[in-house]
Each structure stands twice: as C-alpha cells, then as structure tokens.
Amino acid sequence: MAEVSSFKGLLYNTSKVKIEDVVAPPYDVISPEEQERLYQRSPYNVVRLILGKETPRDTLSDNRYTRARAFLEEWIREEILIRDAQERLYLYRQEFSALGRKWRRMAFFARVRLADFSEEVILPHERTLSAPKEDRLKLLRECRVNFSPIFGLFPDEDGGVYSLLKDASEVSPFCRFGDEAGVIHEFWLLDGTLVEAIKRSFGSQPILIADGHHRYETALQYKKERTQANPNHTGREPYNFVMMALVSMKDPGLLVLPTHRVLKGDLPYSAEVLEERLGRYFERMALYSDLNGLLSALDGASPHVFGLHFSGGPFLLVSLKKGVDLDRELSHLPPPMRELDVILLHELLLERVFGVSHEEVRDKGRLGYYKDARQALEDVDKGVGSLAAFLRAPSVDEIWKVARVGETMPQKSTYFYPKLITGLVMNPLD
C-alpha cells in the first residue's frame, strides 16, 4: 500500500511576503484574466512558476518553463523561498460555504512514493490527455520541484488520522487568509511526535486521486527518466516521490459537487418521438417552473434521478423506470459503473434516447460541461444548446468502488470543491 513520509518543504518567507499575495489556484483553472491579476498582485506570485506567460519571442532556450526555473532560483537566492530546517508533515484546512451551509475540510501534505496504477496502490478515477502531461513534464524537467499538491483521498477506516488532524488544528495556525471566492485557508507546520502519530495511524492504505491525474502521471514519467539517467539509483531519491494533500474519506467536509451537461446542436427527433423514446427507460416524477425548485429536488433525490430542461420548456425531474434491468442493459460495464448516474445519463439518456453516440461526444464536442447550473440554463435558453441535463453529485463511496475495480469515470464526472490552493509548500526533487 501507499508509503507516506515527511519532507523538508520549500516555503515562502513570510517575513518578506504576505502569503495571500503569492498563492494561486491550480494552474488548470487560471484564466488569462486571472493570470494577469496574479502577476500584478505580487512579483513573487507562484503563478510565475506554475503558469508563466508566453510571448511571441519564446524559443527553446527562453520560454515559460526556463523563466519559471530562473524565477525559482532567484527567489531562493533572495530568500523569498526558504527550505524548511526539518522534515515535517503540513496541515491544511479550508473553511467554505456551499449548498447553504458551512464546511471545513482538512488535508495533510506529505511525500508519497510513486507507484504505477497497475500496482493498485495509487488509484485513478479519470482518464488523462497527452497535451497537459507534456506541458507539466516540461515544467518538471526544468524546475525539479512539485509546486502543487496532488489531491488524494484515503479510507481512514477508523477515522484515526482525521482525529489527529482535528486535534492539531486546535492551536493557532502558521498562517490564515481568505481568497476572492470566500474560502478561508489555514496552514500548520507539524513536527515531532504528532508527525509520527499521523504516519502510524495512516499505516499502509491505498490512495484515490481526487484531482491532479495529469500531474501524477507526469511524476511517473519524470521518475522513469531520472531513474534511467542515474546509474546509482537506489529508490530513495526524492524523484521517487510526489507531494500530495491527503484527505480522510471520514472528513465530514469532503464535498463533491455535480458537473451538469448541455447537449449542443439540434435534437435528432421531434418532441413527440423524444417523449416516446424517453418513456422506454425513464418516467416523469415532477415538473417545476424554475431551476431552483428542480435543484432542490435533486439535492435530496435518490440515485438514478435527473433534471432536464429543453429551451423554452419547463424543468422535468425524471427517474429510471422500475423494472429496467441495468445488469442486462449495461452488461458491457462492470457492476459499480452500472449504478452511476453519469453512466445512465451517457449510456441510456444520451445514446439510446437522444441518439448521441460516444464518438459524437468525444470527437465532435456535442457536450458542454458546467459547474454552474445557472450558466447551463442560460446557454440553453440562448440557443447554445438544445438540452440541459442536471445531475446529482456522485458520492465518494461510488467513486471509490469504481476505482477499486480498475475503472475510470466518464469525463467531467467529479468536482471536488473547493480546489486546493498552490504555494503553501513545495517539494524539491533534488
């Protein structure tokens, strides 16, 4: 199972910078506008390392990756970034509002030994794309530092790690600040007997990647390259590990939000034909006059329930008909996959009812993906799409079961909220 260890992190020197000025969201959610704001916020903002600006004059020897390395080296020389004097674990807590209530989620930063997915030690739940991995690999080759943590989950069956983290958070944090989304971030430096207690309680557990699949696969490739180039490879070098922020599955603040869908282009059938085809698998539960009513019903709904909205029409709540044999209808999929709402949406609703094939979704961009249900509604009503499909969020248990049988979820199936911030601690690989 997973090997977790403490490490000497690379930290911002809070005597020289304000931590809230130098942190940033994960690189893959930073828009060009936000990139510019982060550049303006501080000359030492971590965005210059994780997502530097490109210019028309970029060359093989002068580009966003080489500039990231230059910034990194300069900031270390100027002691903007300083190496921790001792090996630690680092505690991170986020306080946030969602679904009409307050939440708290805790993670601890650690080095985790890299393992191929075939070893079933680190488990993915999403597929990856080649372009983002190539981008992150170029950055890793130049800088040799994990700038951002991979978000991992672990079973924590007895809740022992969660209890230790909760106790550790009772003292004043090393730093505390809020961001523009209203999330409060708190960070502690852990040491001594507490670190050993957390490692003992963690023991040997598998880890599910919640977010950061591209960076994890990049770390695997980087390890392979460094191993081949090192005739004295022992397996204990820093490049054999990757930095993760690990969250207990027993944490009551672990929140997964749904990602809704919009079907682009015209519907292939008339309303009458669609009604008949829909009735083969689904039955109407209720009609709503507005989106709020539909989302409230979805929030407390049982599995296999969806919200649908056609442009100019009402909001429908539909459920899988009793008597539909999912073992027969979805026999080509393993049992845990057959129970996922998102699978029923893609396999039964989109493909068999609306006639939209997997190839059209994958190759022709027939689906839009939305974290904001109101944006999905607005785009359908503006004619960007012909149908909005609103989903319940998958549970952590559902995601875990899929990963344990070696399967991955469809694209954009999970949205762990909120994202982890980048810049609290970094993991040098030399």
Image: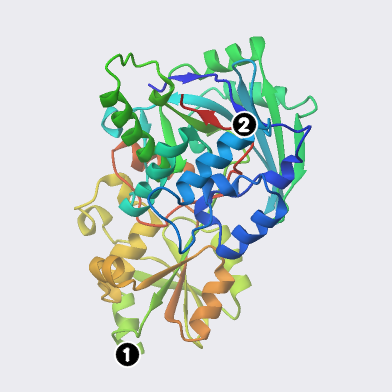
Q: Is residue 285 above or below residue 87?
A: below
Picture coordinates of residue 80 (x, y %)?
68, 34
N-term-proximal mark, 1 vs 2: 2
Circle 1 SS class: loop
Picture coordinates of residue 117 (x, y %)?
30, 34
> Residue shown at 26%/32% (left/top)?
118
Picture coordinates of residue 139 (x, y %)?
44, 43
Looking at the image, residue 348 sits to the left or right of residue 307; the answer is left
Circle 2 SS class: helix
> Residue shown at 27%/68% (left/top)?
363
Residue tagged by mark 2?
A: 76
Q: Residues within 10 Å of mark 1 (few under 14, many from 20)?
A: few
The disc placed on residue 314 is none
Q: Residues within 10 Å of mark 2 (few under 14, many from 20)?
A: some
> Residue shown at 33%/76% (left/top)?
278
The disc placed on residue 270 is 1
Residue 281 at least partly seen: no
Please identify the quarter of the rendering in which residue 422 is found.
Answer: top right
Q: Nearer the viewer, mark 1 or mark 2?
A: 2
Q: Is residue 217 above or below residue 111?
A: below
Picture coordinates of residue 227 (x, y %)?
30, 24
- The amino acid marked with disc number 1 is Ser
Q: Front-most of 287 and 420?
A: 420
Looking at the image, residue 97 sits to the left or right of residue 397; the answer is right
